[in-house]
Image (tube, helix red, strand yellow):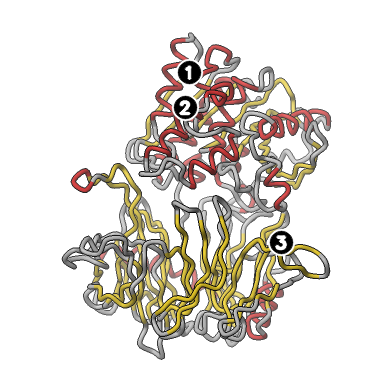
């Protein structure tokens, strides 16, 4: 819940004052170069979730002032704060404007509900903040029979000046339904708006909020189907068996008479080649048409008012790329790139008329900053910094690196060098493995890598096989490679850096979280002779137990999650004992380096027992191990206190086992 206080209001006014000054052209002032404390890197961003209102006249954002998180709404024209709400430790995940007067806040909380048979789960909740009335209203609160958690992302539609707030929710009186509800912004109370089966996984709405199309997925038969809605009834257009890699129904097409679907359609051809990507499917005829852009797309961008496709995006080694097919959107983005040359901007939000936009930049001496681009006001205004305690001189340089794995596969990654040591040789190295594993690192400011580099370590972030962003074949190269080639892709990077003379191969440690935590544990237990120490944060230690847990969380044991783990681990279900040969907990006696384990007690993705059993196994084997449980922390290190502690304990452990000097 949110409490509005005079102190929070004063804090937000002080925070916003530099924005007005910069808008008038005042130069940014940076303190002399100094070593920032680790708490500056472990802190939550000073500013996040910056959202411009539909008119472009207001901003909503979450700021950290001292040890408090505050939601604030500011008037850009008047240069003043309209209202604030103290957030405290609430995990705010998203902000959306409801017209120009209210802000919808989506937050999450880890809860256990034994009365209805729900174990520890991360639930999503919605609140509506009205700065004029100094009031916060809880969505779905006090509605008999309605579970108060959001069962999907809220949708806010302009609706000719009377915004619609729609979200799916569960009614205990309607089995197998996750209907769409309209929320009253004044009371937060829901009213059923559209019937939707719980098998509906995606839907596209018209401007009045009614579904034009929907996608259903039957988890039993693993069948995905595209359906068009006509007169309240659904008509199937196409279906496919999809045990994994389900198609996605994304939104309206460019003309509003079609929908955009991301699917694998080898049965369709384009210039004699199979197509895997975006399709435009006509709502009247059901005809599929492939969409081609200047690059392989990873995401679609839709107009804030019409909901129609206006562009696409992808993330490359050099940053995020955009391609726009709508003239106004393209003109705005041209102004962004002109106003921020070489800054690799990322679109955060924009006004309904596409005349103003908020963009984010980071990397190349930038610890992260939000900027306002205004086509009417002219130029670019810096709104604020994400890490205002980390000045440009403190930001370590990041190089793009490419090397060949042992089998010849090209691996891309990033090397962060300690500040002032860009030309140094023989540096100590930390291999920082990303989670997922079907994810990737990029070259922007990374608080974890930068914090380690600030203490004198070179940091390698390799996008090993199985990572996203390098094409389908590269992802598939990671199938079945947990503890195998996905692991040696990392140590191949160590050997390549050593061959270049950049690092000392005798001074290398490995660190990571989630899948990266598994990789950190697999270093000393599976890939011997490479690392002097390892730090695992929320890592998987027992592959078979992890798959069994996922299988036990559903009535059906063959769930999508189980199939995903089987694909990447190379197993055959929760009983496959072959997974033991690549489970660090089963190989504790072979560990050849000290290990530090950190794990949040509220982790709902990788249970803390995975670290507890690893610590016990290492102790029984007489191996050096430390284990720290992070109270109140989830899988994503969402709390500043525990995030800073994780970083501090990691550096302490590295310095003890692999001194940087």
Q: Residue at x 39, y 63 (%)?
A: 152
Check contact, mark 3 vs mark 2: CB within 8 A: no
Q: CA distance from mark 1 to mark 3?
A: 50 Å
Q: Which mark is residue 597?
A: 2
Q: Position of residue 621 (x, y in %)?
A: 48, 10
Numbered badge on residue 625: 1
Q: Residues within 10 Å of mark 1 (few under 14, many from 20)?
A: some
Residue contact between numbered discs 1 and 2, judged by CB atoms under 8 Å: yes
- Measured Cα–Cα span from mark 3 to mark 2: 45 Å
Q: Residue 386 placed where, x, y %?
A: 51, 57
Q: Residue at x 45, y 16 (%)?
A: 617
Label 1: which secondary element: strand
Task: Determine contact: label 1, label 3, CB under 8 Å.
Answer: no
Q: Camera-side residue: 23 or 184?
A: 184
Query: Residue tagged by mark 3?
Result: 266
Q: Point out the tag, 3 or 2, that comes first from the N-terminus.
A: 3
Q: Earlier in the sequence, mark 1 or mark 2?
A: 2
Residue neighbourhood size for the residue with mark 3, other residues' Cα within 10 Å, grouped as few (<14), some (14–19), many (≥20): few
Distance of label 1 from label 2 (alpha carbons)? 8 Å
Task: Give the structural element (helix, strand or loop) at label 3.
Answer: strand
Give the image location of residue 305, x and y in percent.
Answer: 50, 83
Is 499 situated left or right of 384 in this image? right
- Residue 462 falls in image quadrant: top right
């Amino acid at each position: 819940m949110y409490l509005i206080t005079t102190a929070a209001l004063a804090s937000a006014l002080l925070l916003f004052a530099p924005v007005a000054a910069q808008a008038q052209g005042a130069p940014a002032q940076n303190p002399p170069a100094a070593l920032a404390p680790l708490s500056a890197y472990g802190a939550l961003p000073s500013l996040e979730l910056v959202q411009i209102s539909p008119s472009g006249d207001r901003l909503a954002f979450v700021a950290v002032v001292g040890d408090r998180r505050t939601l604030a709404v500011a008037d850009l024209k008047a240069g003043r704060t309209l209202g604030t709400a103290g957030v405290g430790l609430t995990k705010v995940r998203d902000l959306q404007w409801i017209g120009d007067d209210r802000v919808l806040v989506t937050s999450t909380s880890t809860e256990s509900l034994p009365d209805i048979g729900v174990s520890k789960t991360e639930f999503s909740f919605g609140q509506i903040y009205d700065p004029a009335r100094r009031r916060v209203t809880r969505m779905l609160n006090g509605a008999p029979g309605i579970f108060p958690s959001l069962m999907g992302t809220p949708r806010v539609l302009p609706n000719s000046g009377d915004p619609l707030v729609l979200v799916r929710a569960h009614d205990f009186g309607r089995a197998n339904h996750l209907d769409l509800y309209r929320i009253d912004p004044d009371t937060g109370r829901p009213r059923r708006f559209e019937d939707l089966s719980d098998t509906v996984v995606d839907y596209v709405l018209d401007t009045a909020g009614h579904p034009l199309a929907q996608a259903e997925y039957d988890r039993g038969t693993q069948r995905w189907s595209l359906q068009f809605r006509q007169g309240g009834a659904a008509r199937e257009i196409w279906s496919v068996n999809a045990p994994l890699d389900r198609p996605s129904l994304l939104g309206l097409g460019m003309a509003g008479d079609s929908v955009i679907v991301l699917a694998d359609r080898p049965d369709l051809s384009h210039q004699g080649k199979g197509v895997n990507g975006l399709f435009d499917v006509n709502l009247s005829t059901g005809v599929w048409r492939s969409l081609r852009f200047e690059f392989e797309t990873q995401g679609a961008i839709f107009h804030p008012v019409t909901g129609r496709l206006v562009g696409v995006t992808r993330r490359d080694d050099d940053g995020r790329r955009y391609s726009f097919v709508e003239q106004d959107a393209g003109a705005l983005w041209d102004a962004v790139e002109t106003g921020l040359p070489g800054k690799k901007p990322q679109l955060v939000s924009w006004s309904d008329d596409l005349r103003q936009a908020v963009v984010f930049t980071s990397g190349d001496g930038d610890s992260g900053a939000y900027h306002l681009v205004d086509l009417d006001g002219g130029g670019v205004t810096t709104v604020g910094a994400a890490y205002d305690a980390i000045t440009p001189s403190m930001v370590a340089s990041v190089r793009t690196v490419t090397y060949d794995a042992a089998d010849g596969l090209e691996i891309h990654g990033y090397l962060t060098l300690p500040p002032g040591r860009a030309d140094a040789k023989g540096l100590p190295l930390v291999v920082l493995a990303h989670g997922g594993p079907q994810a990737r690192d990029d070259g922007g400011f990374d608080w974890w890598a930068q914090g380690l580099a600030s203490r004198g370590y070179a940091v390698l972030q390799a996008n090993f096989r199985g990572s996203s962003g390098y094409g389908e074949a590269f992802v598939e190269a990671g199938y079945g490679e947990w503890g195998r080639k996905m692991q040696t892709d990392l140590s191949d990077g160590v050997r390549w850096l050593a061959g270049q003379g950049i690092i000392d191969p005798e001074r290398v440690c490995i660190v990571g979280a989630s899948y990266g935590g598994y990789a950190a544990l697999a270093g000393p237990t599976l890939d011997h002779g490479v690392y002097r120490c390892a730090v695992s944060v929320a890592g998987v230690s027992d592959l078979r137990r992890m798959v069994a847990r996922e299988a036990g969380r559903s009535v059906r044991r063959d769930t999508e999650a189980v199939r995903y783990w089987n694909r990447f681990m190379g197993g055959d279900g929760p009983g496959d004992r072959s997974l033991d040969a690549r489970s660090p907990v089963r190989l504790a006696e072979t560990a050849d380096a000290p290990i530090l384990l950190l794990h949040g007690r509220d982790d709902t993705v990788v249970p803390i027992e995975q670290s507890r059993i690893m610590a016990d196994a290492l102790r029984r084997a007489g191996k050096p191990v430390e284990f720290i449980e992070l109270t109140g922390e989830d899988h994503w290190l969402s709390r500043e206190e525990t995030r800073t502690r994780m970083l501090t304990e990691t550096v302490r452990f590295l310095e003890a086992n692999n001194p940087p000097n």
